Amino acid sequence: MKKFTLVFSVFIFSLVNAQISLSLPEEKNKYDILLLSGTVKPDPLAGKLSSQRIEKEEVLSGRYFRIIQFLKIPTDQEKRELKATGVDLLVYLPNYSFFAAISEATIPSSLNTLANIRTVLPVRPEYKLHPNLKNDQLPADAEVVPGKADLTLIYFKGIPAGAMEKALQSKIKGIKILEHDAASQMIKVRVKKKYVSKVATVSGIQYVEPVEQIKVENYTAITGHRSNTINNATPGGLTYDGTGVGVLVGDGGACANHVDFTGRIKGAVGSYYHSTHVAGIIGGAGNLHPLLKGHAPGVNMIYRDWHSGIASIGAIAPLYHGVDSIRVTNHSLGEGVNLGYTATARESDVQVDSLPSLFNVHSGGNYGPNWYRITGGFKAGKNAIAVGNLDLVDGWNSSSSRGPSRDGRIKPDICTKGTNVGSTAAGNSYATYTGTSMQGC
């Protein structure tokens, strides 16, 4: 009995010791702040706000910005107490941290009474830079004009759009504003390459990443899709043909004026094969070839050139709320390979959050068969639907991009037939193509 007790005690001691040793790494990294630019290990002895000097150039529209880390996630009551002192928590950062906007009038020592605050950190320029911009790097796609860098900037919520542009123009010589979507706090700019890192020093800027050029996701091959179970001619069958629903299509060239779209498409008219084929898969009427009818031959479609024409809330909101009743956007386009959660991914999520009946649908990409090859960008959004390409017997097409996303989430979200898909072509004809564009519709 004594021998058994001794052995059992040693076993329990070993088990407890093992559990302690297994938990140590987790405890050690508990307060790491995980940014796309890298991991920050904050020093809890660095002090609270009262020990930090606030520089004049940090203040923008009466506020400056910090990272506040808590011992535990703050309660709603604690958030209200912070707000009462002039501190707004803006964006959560793992672990236990937030970007915060602090009123210039806030007395720093007033925060010392909030015991849950672990430390307060300045938002350093190196925290803001995408990894592809570090060490003066610049991807080729971002150098549209020789010697210049095209960048996407995210700025903190609550900053007036005009104030943000003025701050950039006053600090970055020769900066050019290319696009500005105030609803998403996103600005695209062009600066001299030597000023890329300097952009991150401007107060109010949350994140800086290189612009990626949008590319059509398709290559020639051969098709068939299957949505006939919800729209068929069987007596008593379902007839959900999209009537009353609007679809916004973004592609790489003007869509042909095909007989299958008569009276149901708006936008530039041209002869681009990709946009014409995608539009037919979505809503072609099958007037000349009934077997190549689209999924929803009753929908109204609006065509826009490239992703930028359908990317912003400013572009979509009037169409969502207006007579066009846009409820689905289609993006059969790519943006780099596994770029992670970029500014365009964030913008897609902001759209869906602001317009709750909206679905943003994306092709997953044609960079298979290896894993970790989703194209984008925007399709890595948490509320975006990325679609993979299957063949006729539900097998992966070898060209279809596989996930996961850069941050480990499951992508693509769904898969369907995208191999040898027949649809509309210029000149009131039809053609077959293969690619994730063909099933991302």
Image (cartoon, rainbow, N blue to C red):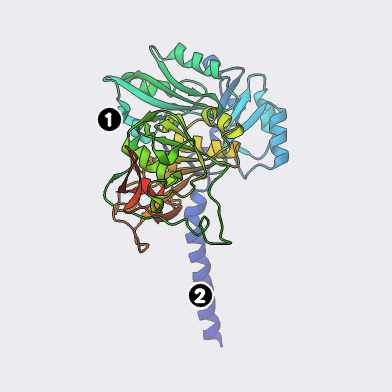
The residue closer to the viewer here, 80 or 5, is 80
Q: Are marks 1 and 2 in contact (CB under 8 Å)?
A: no
Determine the secondary structure under disc 1.
helix
Residue 275 in sight here: yes
Q: In whole angstroms, how far apart are the C-alphas of marks 1 and 2?
A: 61 Å
The x, y position of residue 289, in whole percent, is 38, 49
**Residue at numbered disc 2:** 10
Question: Mark 2 or mark 1, which is nearer the start of the sequence?
Answer: 2
Name the residue type under label 1: Ala
Residue at image coords 54%, 24%: 182
Please state the horizontal and vertical placement of residue 319, each as a whole percent of the image. 56, 31
Which of the two marks, 1 or 2, is nearer to us in this view? Answer: 1
- Residue 30 in the image, given as x and y percentages of width and height: 52, 48
Residue in the image at 56% along x and 88% along y:
1
The residue type indicated by label 2 comes to Val
Q: Which mark is residue 140?
A: 1
Q: Nearer the viewer, residue 333 or 20?
A: 333
Query: Residue shown at 44%/33% (left/top)?
Result: 303
Please state the horizontal and vertical placement of residue 307, each as a whole percent of the image. Answer: 42, 33
Q: Kindly identify the residue that appears in the image at 72 percent across and 35 percent down.
A: 80
Q: State whether residue 13 is above or below residue 157.
A: below
